[in-house]
Image: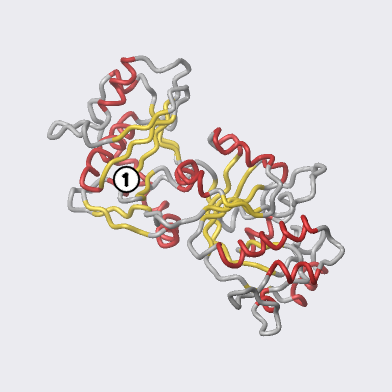
Amino acid sequence: MNNKDTFEILTIPDDTSYWLVRADGGKYLDDYIENSFISIAHNQVTIESIHSDDSPKDGLKNPDIHQMYIDSYPHQTKHWQTIASSQCFEFINNMKIGDVVLTPGKSSDYFAIGVITGDPFDADKSKLRTKKENSGPNGIQYKVDQNLKRRNVTWMKTIHRSSLPGELYWILSAHQAIFNISSYAEYIDPLIFPLFQKHKKIHLTVYTTLEDDLTLANWQGIVEMAKDEQSNYLHQVELQADVHCPGTLVFITGQENIQAIVNIIHTVASLGGNQVITFGGIVTLISLVIGKEGKKKGILNWWDDYRISHIQKKAELKRLKQETKNVPDEVKNIKPQIKDVGTVISHENLKLKEKPENDQEPEK
């Protein structure tokens, strides 16, 4: 590819919110993925009833969801009614199309990550009953969720818990059915893809695989990755680093300095070998960024192209790795990797591994 080529870069809107949505302890995650949705419980309160003219209203004439839960579940405690109605309110009013969803599987050994694509709706009760009746050894091979209140989701990938950054480990023990985790966006975005644009900045995540702490010589190698013969971008690129090894290096710069990011990617590619470039089976990143012009893509449009193009780009990746670049030893010594973590969800791997059910505390 030449410098006139364009690349399609994942652009995450600045107003994106992030949600942890549990699937009853992961029990229904296969159903979520197979049928592209998320849900919440408590079927006595439905989307239809909330928007009914007869529903109780608050002082602003909006549906009073809290009062509906009090009326529909009078034998529950006030604390339960408050939590359940709050989660319903979040699901209906605060979630929006384009938000990112993270849902854990059984025992939180893996997670699915997706994007909300639809407004809340009620599932058809009769169809759900029929699906449940058809589940079992000779029918549907996953547990069928009976929750009515739903939103459509495009699921992108599953991620093993070992790929979660330490800052997200707390969600392994979280029991809330729905939880806003937008304050952890900077740790979730690279799970979608290691290269993206957000807040008018380009972000690239690179990993080092050294077994020892970084030395000054290693830091020199990190600096060298962004340089080329024509320009020096050291004053235009911000570096955020986890100094522990294996470390995480996040390079951030403006769109006008995209060539610095290209230099880093080309450097990593030039080192060659699967131990250096690991894209979780999807090898599009490098061939998509060799150029100077970027075309921004929203998450869903980008994801559609990403899945379609990865097969076509394998040959381009092979060619690129053959165009070796003179890489200084300081760079080689930090053993950089660009990793697209997780497994892309496709029809071939929709059925996730069943794991033994553990005793789970009921979701709040």
Point out the residue furthest to the left here.
230
Residue that appears at 30% across and 35% down: 238
- Would you place residue 122 above or below residue 104 in this image? below
Point out the residue furthest to the bottom here.
53
What residue did someone put label 1 on?
202
Q: Position of residue 217 (x, y in %)?
A: 31, 15
Count of numbered labels shown in the rendering: 1
Q: Nearer the viewer, residue 312 or 212?
A: 212
In the shown orientation, is residue 193 left or right of residue 253? right
Q: Position of residue 4 (x, y in %)?
A: 18, 53
Residue that appears at 78% across and 71% down: 44
Point out the residue furthest to the right here.
75
Q: Position of residue 159 (x, y in %)?
A: 57, 44
Three-letter residue code for mark 1: Ile
Q: Position of residue 310 (x, y in %)?
A: 41, 51
Q: Quadrant of residue 94?
A: bottom right
In the shown orientation, is residue 221 left or right of residue 57? left
Residue that appears at 32% across and 49% down: 288
- Would you place residue 283 above or below residue 347 in this image? above
In the shown orientation, is residue 332 left or right of residue 311? left
Considering the numbered disc 1 on the image, is that residue within a helix, a strand or a loop?
strand
Q: Crowdedness of circle 1 by 10 Å Cα count: few (<14), some, many (20+)?
A: many
